[in-house]
């Protein structure tokens, strides 16, 4: 995986066939390179070419960053004196690449016989620079020699920008599908929580809310209790319950009560959009610790009551700060509203 965004190093294996087949030494090197994902080695083993030196071989050499020349174990390289020999032509092409730009292709002659020696340089004519390259001696310890050869062949990594760009585009597409095409409701984990909240959000008058909320909450609490008694300890269940309780039940009741008190009418109906906006704004201001009024660790009644009082204070303070809403008539009415709501929210829970 670490090499996924890197281009494979192209390697060309130049070798002399024996009876039309690749030599065992050439096959050994090819197999060693095939075990390393960073290399992509090419060795012509089956193609039969007639006539001029094939363009396919020329293109393979030109696109390679490593040129491996397999030297015969017999030390007989007389075939290189033949200007028509294809191994000689392969060497010539590789050398010509480095003539244009130094070290643009690594040339590594590989010998399997430590007694190997090059003939007189002048005899090789245009491929004579090949003798200046260090010979890699591949000894009888094939595993160790393969490691050393792979190390000698290492080139500066090249990033495969096609893979990088394609992967980036694919990630963007997947992100788009997840966020836009596939419907994802991350606010509530359980369908019962969504149903409970959708019912409460339709209530826009205090009196009507009090009548309907009791039935909605009873049904929802029975479901939550049933989940817990069957061993459901899912933290998302508790998160759902706390959010429904604080946002849907407590904050909404406070908002509707405030609007009813300030307008002097317990049946006062406000727009659903405005009520929902006020509930959302207040809920966003409540600290996380106050939102988590219930937990599997069973906080004490006093701790829960203090959290609920905090929610009530934050809600009233926010509503009083809204310039487009009517204000409570003095401290007495404010304390009366708080006392009424606290009794309603706390006692009716039996907590």
Image: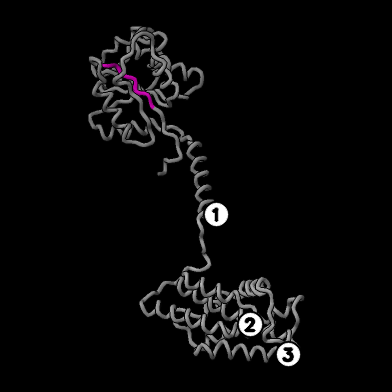
Please report contact status of discs 2 and 1: CB closer than 8 Å, yes or no.
no
Judging depth in this view, the residue of 109 and 171 nearest the camera is 171
Horizontal and vertical percent position of residue 251:
61, 79
Question: Label 2, label 1: how many angstroms apart (C-alpha)?
Answer: 35 Å
Q: Could you tell me which secondary element the residue under label 2 belongs to?
A: helix
Q: Is 25 positioned to the left or the right of 65 in the image?
A: left
Question: Label 1, label 3: how many angstroms apart (C-alpha)?
Answer: 49 Å
Q: Could you tell me which secondary element the residue under label 3 belongs to?
A: helix
Horizontal and vertical percent position of residue 333:
71, 90
Q: Is 51 positioned to the left or the right of 317 in the image?
A: left
Q: Which residue is mark 2?
A: 254
Badge 1 crowding class, 10 Å Cα cut-off, few under 14, some 14 to 19, many 20 or more, is few
Question: Label 3, label 2: how many angstroms apart (C-alpha)?
Answer: 17 Å
Q: Which residue is mark 3?
A: 331
Q: Nearer the viewer, mark 3 or mark 2?
A: 2
Q: Which residue is mark 1?
A: 180
Q: Is 123 positioned to the left or the right of 167 in the image?
A: left
Q: Is 232 positioned to the left or the right of 189 in the image?
A: left
Residue 290 shown in magenta? no
Total number of numbered discs in the rendering: 3
Question: What residue is drawn where x is 47% and y is 19%?
Answer: 97
Question: What residue is drawn where x is 40% and y is 12%?
Answer: 127
Question: What residue is drawn where x is 31% and y is 18%?
Answer: 47
In the image, residue 201 above or below residue 258: above
**On the image, which quarter does residue 340 sit in?**
bottom right
Question: Which is more N-terminal, label 3 or label 1?
Answer: 1
Magenta residues span: 11-17
Q: Could you tell me which secondary element the residue under label 1 belongs to?
A: helix
Horizontal and vertical percent position of residue 65:
43, 26
- Which color scheme is applied? one colour
């Amino acid at each position: 995986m670490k090499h996924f965004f890197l281009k494979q190093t192209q390697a060309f294996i130049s070798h002399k066939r024996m009876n039309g087949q690749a030599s065992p030494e050439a096959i050994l090197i090819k197999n060693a390179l095939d075990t390393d994902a960073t290399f992509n080695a090419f060795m012509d083993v089956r193609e039969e070419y007639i006539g001029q030196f094939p363009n396919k071989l020329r293109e393979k050499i030109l696109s390679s960053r490593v040129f491996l020349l397999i030297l015969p174990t017999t030390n007989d390289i007389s075939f290189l004196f033949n200007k028509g020999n294809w191994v000689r032509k392969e060497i010539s092409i590789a050398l010509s690449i480095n003539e244009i730009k130094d070290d643009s292709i690594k040339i590594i002659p590989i010998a399997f016989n430590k007694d190997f020696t090059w003939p007189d340089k002048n005899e090789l004519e245009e491929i004579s620079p090949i003798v200046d390259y260090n010979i890699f001696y591949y000894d009888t310890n094939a595993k160790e020699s393969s490691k050393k050869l792979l190390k000698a062949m290492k080139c500066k990594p090249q990033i495969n920008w096609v893979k990088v760009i394609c992967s980036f585009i694919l990630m963007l597409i997947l992100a788009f599908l997840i966020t836009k095409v596939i419907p994802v409701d991350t606010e509530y984990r359980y369908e019962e929580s969504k149903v409970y909240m959708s019912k409460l959000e339709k209530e826009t008058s205090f009196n009507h809310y009090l009548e309907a909320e009791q039935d909605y909450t009873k049904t929802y609490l029975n479901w939550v209790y049933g989940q817990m008694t069957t061993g459901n300890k899912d933290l998302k269940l508790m998160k759902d319950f706390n959010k429904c309780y604080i946002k849907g039940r407590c904050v909404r009741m406070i908002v509707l009560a405030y609007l009813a008190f300030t307008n002097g009418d317990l049946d006062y109906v406000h727009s659903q959009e405005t009520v929902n906006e006020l509930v959302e704004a207040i809920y966003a201001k409540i600290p996380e610790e106050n939102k988590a009024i219930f937990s599997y660790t069973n906080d004490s009644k006093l701790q829960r009551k203090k959290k609920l009082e905090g929610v009530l204070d934050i809600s009233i303070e926010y509503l009083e700060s809204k310039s487009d809403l009517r204000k409570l008539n003095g401290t007495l009415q404010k304390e009366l509203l708080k006392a009424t709501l606290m009794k309603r929210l706390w006692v009716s829970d039996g907590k």
